Amino acid sequence: MMEVKPIVIDNRTFLAVSVELPKTTLIAIMSDIGYIMCGALDVGLLNDKLKDRKIIAGRAVGVRSVEDLLNAALESVTDEAEQRGIKVGMIGKEALLRM
């Protein structure tokens, strides 16, 4: 099953997507310029092989729902996210508001 729904934080609207796969669920919340995602996100790949794309993203591990992702501390972030003030340890909601 796949679910797509808007999430409003401080009068800004983001899009949350969750995809149920066998034995795991992919969860992401995106703004118009970046996103946060569950542990399936490969931040190293984004920073190294896809560096020229300048992707703004953050990863939280151990999340099982959109609400978890909004409230979880980010475990890693892309270099481009860091340039926007998004830091490891920042919660998902805060990171989204900087995007």
Image (spheres, helix red, strand yellow):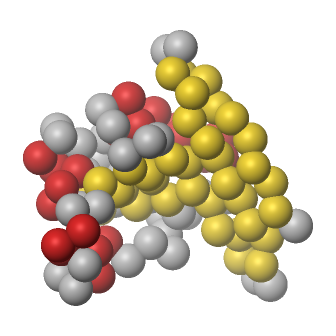
Q: Residue at x 25, y 78 (%)?
A: 50
The residue shown at (37%, 46%) is: 33
Quadrant containing the N terminus is bottom right
From the top left corner, tell me how far across and down residue 94 is, in percent.
37, 31
Position of residue 61 relative to residue 52, above or below, is above
Give the x, y percent position of residue 95.
35, 38
Q: Can you say whether 17 is above or below 51 in the image?
A: above
Locate residue 91, reporting x and y percent.
Answer: 40, 39
Pick the front one: 82 or 5: 5
Residue 93 in sight = yes
- Write the residue at 53% across / 63% down: 38
Judging depth in this view, the residue of 80 and 22 nearest the camera is: 80
x 57%, y 27%: residue: 13
Left or right: 48 as drawn, with respect to 64: left
Quadrant in the picture for the C terminus: top left
Q: Can residue 94 be seen in this view?
A: no
Q: Quick one: which residue is furthest to the right in this view?
A: 1
Q: Tell me where residue 7 appears, x and y as whole percent.
A: 64, 32
| Residue sitting farthest toward the top | 11
Task: Name above or below for residue 76 compared with residue 44.
Answer: above
Left or right: 65 as drawn, with respect to 49: right
User: Could you say which is closer to the camera, residue 29 or residue 73?
Assistant: 29
For the image shown, how many numbered marks are present on the structure? 0
Q: Residue furthest left?
A: 83
Q: Is residue 27 left or right of residue 43?
A: right
Location of residue 67 (image quadrant): top right
